[in-house]
Image (tube, rainbow, N blue to C red):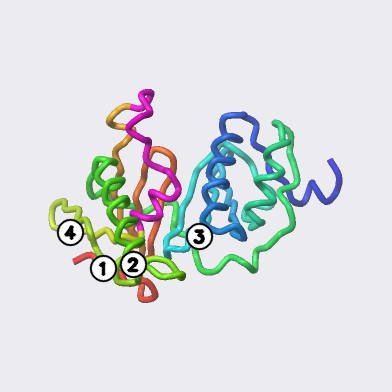
Amino acid sequence: MTGALAERSVTVPDARDRDDLSTFLTHAARLDPGSVVRLRRRGDSHVVAWIETGFDVLAARVIRARVLPSDVTVAADGLLSALRSAGPAPFDPGFGMDSAWRGPVPPDAGWTHVDDVPGPVFVELAERGVALAREHGTDHGPPVSLLDQDVVTVEADDEAVPVSMRMIFALNAMKFVPTVSDSSQSADDARVRVRIARSWIRLDARYGSVFRSRGATIPLMVS
């Protein structure tokens, strides 16, 4: 291994994980051809890939992999290109773009499970939202009033968690919920788990998760 590669490398031993990461990056590139991906080590054998979806929502996918250094940001299209010819050996993920990542990422721990929602509910809401966006949107995308609308409220005990259309658009755009036509998936695979932390809300689906800040910059309150 060369000196440069020893300092910055990604290793994805299993072909299935390389396929999963490639799919994740492909969807990210469709949202924004110039997007960057942040790779962060989780434990000894996993890496979390993060992207900004453009909806003020982050998307993430966990894969079995190793990354050096433990937290690096690179161009999504460059990493995707490298993955297409990569095998199980370490490879160069591309030029570091750490300064291109804006803002924090959610914590690994400290999440509270609120409830599960059938995935098709979110898919149907996304389809309705897309139809409204086409009718009322502009060249800059869907109207802000539509994006900020809370369309689902998930309740458990004394928690009532509103889920905005921003999160549903992001979940659908990243294709995280299995399609109805995928007969290999069970009803449980299609469920979306809603969790909250002090500063974040997250939706966990079969193929990845989306996160939105509950802070002052992106208001999403739980009463």
> Three-letter amino acid code at disc 1?
Met
> Three-letter amino acid code at disc 2?
Arg
Q: Which one is earlier in the sequence, the residue at label 3 or at label 4? A: 3
Q: In the visual, does 104 lie left or right of 127? A: right
> Three-letter amino acid code at disc 3?
Glu
> Where is residue 84 drawn, in percent x and y?
68, 38
Q: Mark 4 points at which residue?
A: 160
State the SS at label 2.
loop
Q: What's the distance in space between the residues labelled 3 and 4, CA to CA?
A: 26 Å
| Segment colored magenta | 167-185
Q: Name the residue under label 1.
A: 221
Q: What's the distance in space between the residues labelled 1 and 4, CA to CA?
A: 9 Å
Residue appearing at x 20%, y 53% in the figure = 154
Q: In the visual, does 184 lie left or right of 163? A: right
Magenta-colored stretch includes residue 169: yes
Residue appearing at x 68%, y 62% in the figure = 97
The residue sitting at the bottom extreme is 216
Residue 22 quadrant: top right
State the SS at label 3.
strand
Q: Name the residue under label 2.
A: 214
